Amino acid sequence: MKRHADTLFNDIFTPEETLKIRKEVREFAEDVIRPVAHRLNTTPESKNTFARREFDAMAAAGLFEIPFPADVGGRGLEFPTLATMTVLEELGYYCPSLASAFYDGQAILVGSTLNNAQPSIRETYLPKLVRGEFVGCFATSEPGASTDLSAKSVETIAEKIDGGYRINGTKRWITNSPCGDLILTLCKTGDALTMLLVDMSQEGVSVCDPDLKMGNHVQQTADVTFTNAFASDEAVVGTVGGGLRTAIQALVQGRMGIGAIGCAMSQAAFDFATDYMGKRKVFGQELARFQHWQYKFADYALQIESARNLCHKAALLYDKFKLADTEAAMAKLAGSRVACDIARDAIQVCGAYGFVKTLSGPQAHFPLESIYRDAKIGEIYEGANEIQTWVIARRIFGREMTG
């Protein structure tokens, strides 16, 4: 099947180091992820199905090195965020939920938070993450707080005691938690929020069975409950009271990542559908000869190109200036929207071959139904798309108008 990104997407502005990363990760994805992608994309969540083999393979291949500086065992790239978006798109082409769980969740949300932490935490834990020695979790959402992460809404409390903090509360939708080792936890400390790094092996931390979701099965989520759990004074990430800023720094990159995964799903659906349209005959002619579908997929080529360019621009801005809030919002909006739209129309043009998961007679597997299921979450998590629209509007009209 032809990968149209290789001919429709022009690499004229892409740095050579990023092109090398793309080649490396594409080969990994072809060899390791593609053969098991159908199983990963269609198997419901359980602790027994956590993709440990693929996680370990990513670590062994050095993929967790890519976003980080050389002093912690990383690649020390000039444009690490751009390279990270490229990794997400290559992994997400075959398994978007794996890309989301193990790269957006592990490398971006947990990894970038540790990279920006004080030296005592950064130098202890980030090299271990780069080597794949633990599974990390990023816990901000709660049963009553997700998009709104204000101190008024967050109900997980960290009470100051001798030597550290006593933590009580519940976090919800926590990626990788069913098999997690360490959890970055946003807690209320007085009238402000603080990020704490918590050991999940202690008795005070309990994790439910994985949530059973519509899609995104590799990205296992669950409730995490803290009952008098302990975190030492040295476990504060950043500053006491500075937890919201710490979380937002990671989420900006995470939003770009969701856009990149959206581009991956869009491209995979586009490639399958256009290949099918060139072969399938209806009323004596190939579907690709119908002008309706020609125009529809020409427009989708434009949208994928635009979304990918927004992701790359946001990443480059972050690499150069560490500031890309509006561009990250645009990237997430564009990538997640086109993924949903193209998955729907790809199924429509492919008919039953788009709707089917496995054709039992020949035991043939088909990808569009899982892409359709997986795409929707991109418009919801890491800041709902309505919030991203508000971020853009705030840039246009200013806080005095938008709040």
Image: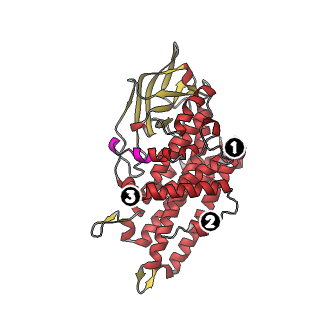
Residue 179, given in percent of the width and then of the height, sits at 40, 37
Query: Which amino acid lies under the numbered mark 3 shown in the image of this protein?
Result: His
Name the N-terminal-most of marks 1 and 3. 3
List the residue tagged with mark 2: 9
Is 398 positioned to the left or the right of 283 in the image? right
Query: Which amino acid lies under the numbered mark 1 shown in the image of this protein?
Result: Leu
List the residue tagged with mark 1: 323
Q: CA distance from mark 1 to mark 2?
A: 26 Å
Note whether residue 194 is visible. Answer: yes
Tell which of 76 and 280 is nearer to you. 76
Q: Tell me the magenta residue range.
A: 46-55
Which marked residue is nearer to the observer: mark 1 or mark 3? Answer: 3
Name the N-terminal-most of marks 1 and 2. 2
List the residue tagged with mark 3: 38
When the figure is inspected, residue 121 is found, relative to residue 210, above or below; the finding is: above
Magenta stretch holds residue 54:
yes
Is 227 positioned to the left or the right of 300 in the image? left
Tag shown at residue 372: none
Name the N-terminal-most of marks 2 and 3. 2
Q: Could you say which quadrant of the image residue 124 lies in?
A: top right
Tell which of 260 and 151 is nearer to you. 260
Give the structural element (helix, strand or loop) at label 1. loop
